[in-house]
Image (cartoon, grey):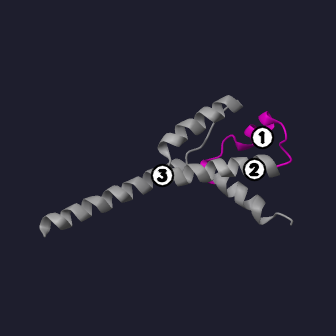
């Protein structure tokens, strides 16, 4: 019984650490000076984020590219994301969805 409790505790700790890792990566600021550097930053995030968070980030970027009409050029669009964390990019896309007119 003692071993089972120890194993359950270890499993809980591993799950907790894994979720913290993902959350901390969602708050990592993406700094880039070109669209190519932004793509490389996304490739690094793909390794460190869990699949759900990475998909949410890439969906947010795609959505913003469609609806953010202030940044029509590729450079302008990526410049608008420079210095934001993945979480901030996701939140930015949600704010566009909140203010959408149907």
Q: As drawn, is 85 to the left or to the right of 3?
A: right
Q: Quadrant of the C terminus?
A: bottom right
Which residue corresponds to the image point at 59% horizontal and 39% vertical from the top-left? 42
Q: Is residue 80 above or below residue 56?
A: above
Where residue 66 appears, as percent x and y from the top left, is 80, 49
Residue 2, labelled with which disc? Answer: none
Q: As drawn, is 10 to the left or to the right of 47?
A: left
Q: Is residue 47 above or below residue 94?
A: above
Identify the element where label 2 is drawn.
Answer: helix
Query: Residue beneath label 1, please?
Result: 77
Q: Quadrant of the N terminus?
A: bottom left
Q: How would you rate the neighbour count of disc 2 (Cα within 10 Å): few for under 14, some for 14-19, many for 20 or more? A: many
Identify the element where label 3 is drawn.
Answer: helix
Q: Which residues are magenta?
A: 68-87
Q: Is residue 7 above or below residue 72?
A: below
- The answer to whether the residue labelled 2 contacts the one labelled 1, judged by CB atoms less than 8 Å apart, is yes
Q: Earlier in the sequence, mark 3 or mark 1?
A: 3
Quarter assignment of residue 20:
bottom left
Q: As drawn, is 53 to the left or to the right of 78?
A: left
Which residue corresponds to the image point at 77% horizontal and 40% vertical from the top-left? 77
Q: Residue furthest bottom?
A: 1
Find the distance from the CA under tag 3 to the CA under tag 2. 22 Å
Query: Residue beneath label 3, please?
Result: 22
Where residue 52 appears, as percent x and y from the top left, is 54, 54
Q: Earlier in the sequence, mark 3 or mark 2?
A: 3
Find the distance from the CA under tag 3 to the CA under tag 1. 25 Å
Query: Residue beneath label 2, please?
Result: 64
Which residue corresponds to the image point at 80% horizontal and 37% vertical from the top-left? 76
Identify the element where label 1 is drawn.
Answer: helix
Where residue 65 appears, as percent x and y from the top left, is 77, 46
Answer whether residue 56 is magenta in the image. Answer: no
């Amino acid at each position: 019984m003692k071993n089972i409790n120890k194993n359950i505790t270890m499993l809980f700790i591993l799950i907790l650490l894994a979720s913290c890792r993902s959350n901390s990566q969602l708050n990592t600021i993406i700094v880039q000076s070109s669209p190519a550097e932004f793509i490389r930053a996304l490739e690094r995030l793909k390794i460190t984020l869990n699949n759900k968070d990475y998909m949410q980030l890439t969906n947010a970027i795609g959505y913003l590219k469609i609806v953010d009409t202030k940044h029509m050029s590729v450079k302008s669009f990526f410049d608008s994301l420079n210095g934001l964390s993945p979480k901030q990019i996701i939140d930015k896309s949600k704010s566009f969805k909140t203010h959408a007119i149907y």
